[in-house]
Amino acid sequence: MNQRSFAFAHAGMLLWSLLIAASFSAAAQVNQAIDPILLTGLRLLLCALAFLPLLLVNGDSPMTVRGLLGHGVLGLLLAVYFGSLFEALRYTSAVNTGTMFTLVPLLTLAIEAVLMPDNNLKQRLLPMLVAATGAILLVMKGAGPGELPSLYALSVYGVGCLAMALYPPLSQRLKARCFKGRGPVGMTFWNMLSGASFLLAFCGYSGGWRSASLLAMSDVAWLVYLALFATLATFWLLHRAIGVIAPSSVISYIYLSTLLLTLFHWLWWHQSPMPLEIVGAVLVGVGMLSLLMASRRSIPVTVQN
């Protein structure tokens, strides 16, 4: 194992967690009357355009038909996830979707076991279960008896969570088969462009594009911030880490972002932590530390520089 790449990958995912945690407050500043799928499509498109100069200057491996199809599949997974999230939020609360999202790393581990069998998978199962339990305790605060999700919302967002869980291991699998020589910049650019195309095409079909007239300059500024830091940077860090550490370990940093968001509420908004939140925070910390130790003992399939 390249210890330097290993350290950089985990340091990058720590930054990823911070950016994800900060994105929730930034997203709340955008006019909520604007179609959310349109906003997400524009975010992904801005990400792709921001990476285009780097791609043109540094170059990348030649695009093939198989590569284009592979990026289309990964972009479709992004579109399915975001589309299912916004549809589910029409019928249930953000607390319930947040609780379901904690299942994504465990689903990723199961998919990884099928696509990339590894003897070290069992070592990561218990730490992920501990961290997932802690994250559920953190996001369940504020959930009331009347906030149970409908079966429709559960089914729709379940498909989206499955799509997001499939993204990291399938990305690594396709990188070895269809994207040989393609770096994080090229991977991020083509996946973002594909995802934006699917989402914007859906907005054209549904009529959501009409809400673009409601965009103010402040909305555009927040959209650019979200595109650069909450989407572009996070997906670049994600692709930089995939291949150095196991996909399930990469996506498990979701739990750390949940913990950081809770700590932000405690410290910045001066919210008093509840007993269950404290227990949850401890479990997330223990689970992530154990997962880090387990990933140090695993041998990655490929190493990105």
Image (spheres, grey):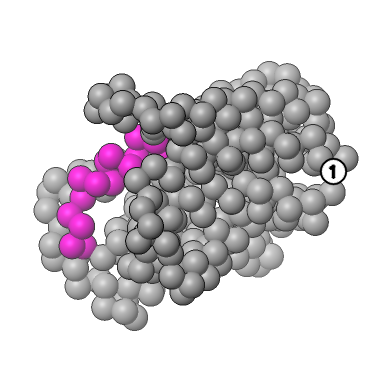
Q: In this picture, which residue range is highlighted in magenta?
A: 15-34
Residue denoted by label 1: 118
Q: Quadrant of the C terminus?
A: top right
Identified at 64% across, 57% down, the residue is 166
Q: Position of residue 104 (x, y in %)?
A: 59, 51
Q: Nearer the viewer, residue 79 or 201?
A: 79
How many numbered dots are placed on residues in this image?
1
Q: Can the viewer see residue 284 in this picture?
A: yes
**Is 97 included in the stretch rendered in magenta?**
no
Q: Position of residue 65 (x, y in %)?
A: 65, 67
Secondary structure type for disc 1: loop
- Magenta span main SS: helix
Q: Amino acid at mark 1?
A: Asp
**Is 24 included in the stretch rendered in magenta?**
yes
Q: Position of residue 272 (x, y in %)?
A: 31, 26
Q: Quadrant of the N terminus?
A: top right
Splitting the image into 4 quarters, where does residue 270 fall? Answer: top left
Identified at 31% across, 79% down, the residue is 206
Identified at 19% across, 73% down, the residue is 210
Q: Nearer the viewer, residue 296 or 46?
A: 296
